[in-house]
Image (cartoon, rainbow, N blue to C red):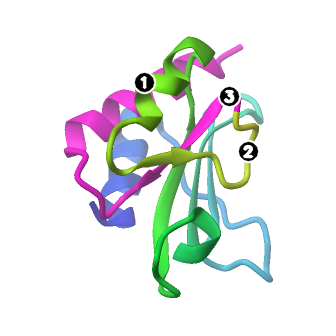
Amino acid sequence: MKRETLFNYARERYKAEPEYLWSNLPGYAVLRHHQGEKWFGLVMNVTGTKLGLATEEKVDVLEVKVRPEQIGSLRKKEGILPAYHMNKEHWISILLSGPLTPEEIYDLLSESHELTAG
């Protein structure tokens, strides 16, 4: 999945525009709740080796919050890694170029949106 596809979905579904908060990290975008400041997604381009991958190339990942009891089973799936930037007990990183279908990614984004509401 391309990051723009994800951003278009977030716009249509959640009225969330990607926010680029750091001038020194132009490839990092936050997705926030329409009302409020809580993040429900973070898209980053990270060097693969920082994620434990065997590549120096940058890859796009989406970080989402999930229920702690799901972390173990989700991390067993190809394309899902421990969170790179957020709390590893509550967040995961999803390789956007990985094997997950758009529907699987959207479901995880939806769950993150729900878990971070309020």
Circle 1 packing at 10 Å, graded few (<14), some (14-19), many (20+), is few
Q: Which mark is in front, 1 or 2?
A: 1
Residue at 64% from the left image edge and 18% from the top image edge: 117
* 84 shown above or below 105: below
Cα–Cα span, label 3 and label 2:
21 Å
Three-letter amino acid code at disc 3? Gln
Residue to which mark 3 is pinned: 35
The disc, 3 or 2, on the residue closer to the chain's N-terminal end is: 3
Residue 73 is labelled as 1
Q: Answer with left or right where residue 78 lies relative to residue 33.
A: left
The disc, 1 or 3, on the residue closer to the chain's N-terminal end is: 3
Cα–Cα span, label 1 and label 2:
18 Å
Magenta part of the protein: which range? 89-118
Q: Which mark is in front, 1 or 3?
A: 1
For the image shown, how many numbered marks are present on the structure? Answer: 3
Residue at 79% from the left image edge and 80% from the top image edge: 23
The answer to whether residue 47 shows anywhere in this view is no
Instruction: Pinpoint residue 58: horizontal percent, then vertical percent.
Output: 51, 81
* 9 shown above or below 14: below
